[in-house]
Image (spheres, helix red, strand yellow):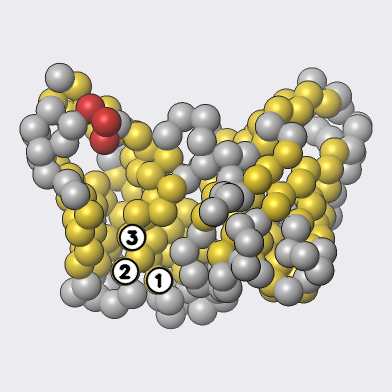
Amino acid sequence: EDQVTQSPEALRLQEGESSSLNCSYTVSGLRGLFWYRQDPGKGPEFLFTLYSAGEEKEKERLKATLTKKESFLHITAPKPEDSATYLCAAAGTASKLTFGTGTRLQVTL
Amino acid sequence: KAGVTQTPRYLIKTRGQQVTLSCSPISGHRSVSWYQQTPGQGLQFLFEYFSETQRNKGNFPGRFSGRQFSNSRSEMNVSTLELGDSALYLCASSFGPNEKLFFGSGTQLSVL
């Protein structure tokens, strides 16, 4: 059965303090690794898709990377508006998207 | 371009009742997926429809069902509601399977 595990569950950073979120996955035949951001009371918002080990994608202060077993979401010099829950999801050969339980990020001044 | 629209936004039901939730995907999207989100379990996959056919189904009891219409709009139904069905139900659409998902804001269901 496909599994996705995210760590840490919660992370509190000061503005400007860079860090990384981890997503470990076990899926049969990875077809895509997705990162989403979810704000309270809203649905998840797409950030990145990664397809193969070694691939990297960047958007503003966020950079996502992928290995054969893990993905990392690096946050460089975060701002309070980056506070949200970050979700990782993996699609395997069954074409079913399996989500992790997310990392709640809080960035303080 | 309009996003994914889910109605209603909030719903309160009592145990034993049934409920129908509606989802209108982004224009041109033919794939619609449904997820249940709870604080403890995160997002759990319910089912996925593509061109009116159910492509995938998650590990939920038969009380949970869905369908997709020819205009790609989708509905999900939960019969004989239980307290544990209280959750945020999210609908997402995409051009096709394995494509990035666009989520609606969800329907918050409370079962009393």
Which residue occupies 70% across, 52% down? B24
Q: Chain of mark 1?
A: A
Q: Split into 4 quadrants, where in the image is the N terminus of chain B?
A: bottom right
Comes first in the chain, label 2 or label 1: 1
Q: Are marks 2 and 3 in contact (CB under 8 Å)?
A: yes
Q: Are marks 2 and 1 in contact (CB under 8 Å)?
A: yes
Whether labels 2 and 1 belong to a single chain: the reply is yes
Disc 2 residue crowd, few under 14, some 14–19, many 20+, Cα 10 Å: many
Q: Which residue is mark 1?
A: A32
How far apart marks 3 and 1 lie (CA) works out to: 10 Å
Disc sitting over residue B77 in the figure: none
Which residue occupies 35% across, 65% down? A49
Which residue occupies 23% across, 27% down? A80
Along the viewing direction, whichever of B23 and B47 lies nearer the viewer? B23
Q: Position of residue B5 (x, y in %)?
A: 65, 45
Q: Chain of mark 3?
A: A
How far apart marks 2 and 3 lie (CA) works out to: 7 Å
Above or below — where is B16 with respect to B33?
above
Q: How many marks?
A: 3
- Secondary structure of the residue carrying numbered label 3: strand
Q: Split into 4 quadrants, where in the image is the C terminus of chain B?
A: top right
Above or below — where is A16 with respect to A94?
above
Along the viewing direction, whichever of B12 and A90 lies nearer the viewer? B12
Q: Which residue is mark 2?
A: A50
How far apart marks 2 and 1 lie (CA) works out to: 6 Å
The three-letter amino acid code for the residue at tag 2 is: Leu
Q: Chain of mark 2?
A: A
- Secondary structure of the residue carrying numbered label 2: strand
Disc sitting over residue A48 in the figure: 3
Comes first in the chain, label 3 or label 1: 1
